[in-house]
Image (spheres, rainbow, N blue to C red):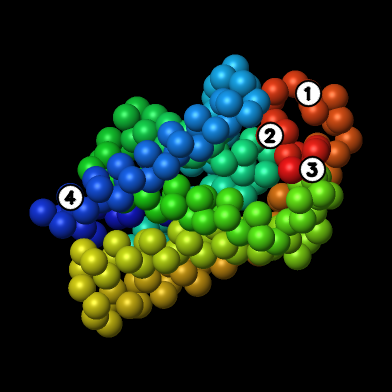
Amino acid sequence: MHIEEGVVTGAKIFLSYGTAGAAALFGVKLAYEAAHHSGLTSLISRSAMATAAVFAFFELLPHYPVGVSEVHFILGSTLFLLLGAAPAAFGLALGLLIQGLFFAPFDLPQYGMNLTTLLVPLFGLQLLAKKIIAPDTAYVDLGYGQALALSTAYQGGVVVWVAFWAFYGMGFNATTLSSVGMFGGAYMLVVLLEPLVDLAVLAGAKGLRGLKDSGLVTPRLYAAA
């Protein structure tokens, strides 16, 4: 979902600094709550794992340009279910930044847009999880329908934000509409695959109960809220 260079230019790009800053502040709030709940060491460990995973997702998994952006297998719902919202947010932010600094410096001007596009849907996903997952249900016991809803919410949020940046930067016209449509259609592949990845990862985690008190996964993975 890397916004292509030139989609938003000039003074318009300053909006992305504001949206990214607001998202970052909310991420810090979540981090404070996570550190209070499970400890600073656990938060740092899970954030480091998320950062390594996100970097691998961007660099190693298949990705290809479509329309106004690129299609990536970000697996945001997978990170959320395994590591929690705050570590996932840190991982997305730092993984994206590391990739930009060392492998794709041409993406750095778009960092604010890309960061907003990744983080805001994650926060929406967290709110949705509270509504569709019963308080007495551990994440390892989720069903396909719940995994599909979470994945669709995250990836749908990504598509919505990419569309916003495209229309904001390029105007509402036939060319932009076509490019956004192509990108959104291509992203349906991710929506179809991610719930299966989530369930496979959760099934593997279910057999590794020793991780429960390790601090390396979100406490909700094995325990009720």
Inspect this view and state whether residue 215 appears: yes
Q: Amino acid at mark 4?
A: Phe
Q: Are marks 3 and 1 in contact (CB under 8 Å)?
A: no
Residue that carries the numbered disc 3 in the rendered image: 224
Residue 105 falls in image quadrant? top left
Work out which residue is located at the far bottom of the displayed protein and give it.
174
Q: Which is more N-terminal, label 3 or label 2?
A: 2
Q: Which residue is mark 2?
A: 218
Report helix, strand or loop for mark 3: loop
Q: Earlier in the sequence, mark 3 or mark 1?
A: 1
Question: Residue 80, relative to residue 194: is it above or below?
Answer: above
Label 4: which secondary element:
helix
Q: CA distance from mark 2 to mark 1?
A: 9 Å
Name the quarter where the N terminus is drawn: bottom left
Residue density around tag 2, few if under 14, some if 14–19, many if 20 or more, within 10 Å: many
Label for residue 29? Answer: none
The residue shown at (45%, 64%) is 159
